[in-house]
Image: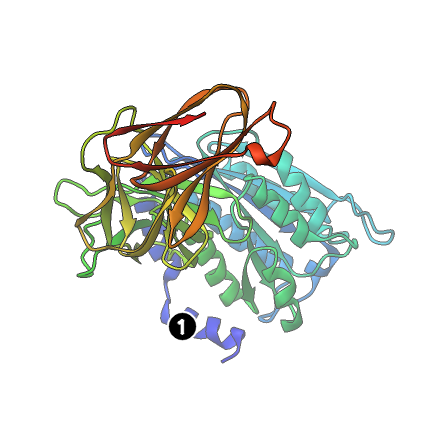
Amino acid sequence: MTIKRKYLNLFSAFRGLHFLLLSLFVLLGSSNLRAQATNTPEKEVITRILFVFDCSRSMLADWKGGDKKIHVAKRLLKETMDSLSTLKNLELALRVYGHQSFVPPQDCGDTKLEVPFGPDNFEKIKQKLDEIQAKGTTPIARSLEKADQDFTPCDNCRNIIILITDGIEACDEDPCAVSLMLQRRNIVLKPFVIGIGMEKSFTDVFKCIGNYFDASNEATFKYALSIVVNQALNKTTTQVNLLDMMDEPTETNVNMTFYDNKTKIIKYNYMHTLDGKGNPDTVYLDPLSKYRMVVHTIPQIVLKDIDIRSGRHNIIGVDAAQGDIIIKQGGAAAPKSKKYACIMRKQDEMETINVQNIDETVRYLVGKYDIEILSLPRVIIEDVKVTQSHTTTVYIPSPGLAVISGLSVGYGSVYEEKNNELIWVCNLSEVFTRESLSLQPGRYRVVFRAKVARKSLYTIEKKFKVESGKTVSVKLN
C-alpha cells in the first residue's frame, strides 16, 4: 500500500477527526507532563512547540484539490491554533523561512523567528500567517540551526519542532546533522516533519531529520498535522517489569538508565520501585524518542530499540531473576585476619563484573559465576550457582599468620608447595627485616639471600606450614 493511499484510508476512517481532537486536546490540557531532562514528577512541565513554516516560492504551486499549498497550510495551521488555545502548560512559536527575499538571487539567510515563545500568543501566530508571502528559497538547515536560540533556557520544558515544508534543503547545508546536534545537546526532542506534496524519493531525506509524515493532499495534511500535535502533547506512561524465574514482576530496587537511541545521551534515571500493592511503579518516558535501556543489575542487562507508543500505558518486560552471594571465612579467627576483596566473573568469562568483600552480601542475576579471592595465595572457586531469591554462601578457610624475620634485609620470596611444584605467592620486603603475612592454610617455602651476601651459595631456604587461626614463626638465620 502506498503512503498516499494509507493516509487516505486513515482519513476516511476518522471523519470528523478535527472535532474529536478538540475534545482530546481539552482533556490533555489537564495532564501533567513531566520534564524532558528530569525525573522530578512534581514539576509543572511546559511543552514548547516551534512551528518551522516553509514560505518558499514553491509553496505557491497548486495542490491536489485546486487551492495553493501555501493557502491550505496557513488555513489548517490557524485551525490548529484555535484547537490548542484552551490548553495549559503549552507555549508556541513560529519561525518562517523563504518569505523575506525573492528568488533569484538565492538568500540562504532568509529565516526569521516571527513569533517568539510565550503564553497565549495563538492570535499573534494566526496574524503573522496572514501577513507572510511565499517568495524565496528553502534554507531548512539554517532554520533548524537558529532554533538553538529560539528555545530560551528552561529547566522544566520539553522542546519540540514541527517542520512543515514542500521541498528539500536548497542551500547545500545538512539539516540532518543540525537536527542531530540539537538532539544531542538536549535542546529539542526528535523533530516532526510534514512533507507537503513531496516526491516519494524525498522520504528518506527527511527521515534522518525526524519523524516524517507524508501529506499528498489537503486531507492527508490535515490528518498528519493533527496526529503530530497529538503525539507532541499526549500523556504516555510506562512500567518496567523486572521478571523473576516464574515470570512475575517481583524484582526491584535497581537503577534503570534510559539513553536516547540516536543521540546516545542519558535521558532518564529511575530507581525501580514496587508500589504499596507490590506492582511496578509507573514512570514517564517521552514517546518522541527510541531508547536503549540499561538495568544496573550485576551483571547489567541491556535492551535496545525500545519504542514507546504515544498515548498509552507501555509495559517493558525484562528477565531479571536474582539471588545473593556471601563469602565467609570458615574455621577459627586468625590474628589480624584480612577482609579480602573478591573478583566476581561470569562463568568461563574474563571480564570482572564486581569486586565483593568478605562478609558482604551482593545480589547477582541467576546463573553461574567464578570467584577469585585476593588472599595469599589467591583462591579460585568456580561454578558458583546463584538461584532465585536464595543466598549462596561460599566458605574459604580463615588464614594463619606467618611471621618471617631475619638478621638483615635482602631478597626473597614466599612459595606455596603444591603437587611437587613451587607456586609463587609474594615477595618479601627489601627494607624490613621482619614482616607478618596472612596466608591461606597450606605448606610453604621461603627462599632468601641477604643483601650483604654476594654469592648464591648463601641462599637460605625454609619450609613452614600454615594452619587456620594459628601463628608460625619463620627465622631466616
Q: Amino acid at mark 1?
A: Ser
Q: How many marks?
A: 1
Q: Quadrant of the C terminus?
A: top left
In the rendered image, the vertical position of residue 160 relative to residue 5, given as above or below: above
Q: Position of residue 328 (x, y in %)?
A: 23, 39
Q: Secondary structure at mark 1?
A: helix
Query: Which residue does the numbered mark 1 point to in the structure image?
Result: 12
Q: Name the residue rendered at 37%, 67% in the picture.
A: 14
Q: Name the residue rendered at 46%, 33% in the picture.
A: 120
Q: Nearer the viewer, residue 338 or 205?
A: 338
Q: Position of residue 12 (x, y in %)?
A: 40, 72
In the rendered image, the vertical position of residue 273 relative to residue 306, given as above or below: above
Quarter assignment of residue 431:
top right
Confirm whether residue 55 shows in the render: no
Quarter assignment of residue 216:
bottom right
Left/right placement of residue 217 relative to residue 59 reads: left
Q: Position of residue 73 (x, y in %)?
A: 58, 56
Q: Name the residue rendered at 47%, 29% in the picture.
A: 155
Left/right placement of residue 470 relative to residue 374 reads: left
Q: Nearer the viewer, residue 241 or 416?
A: 416
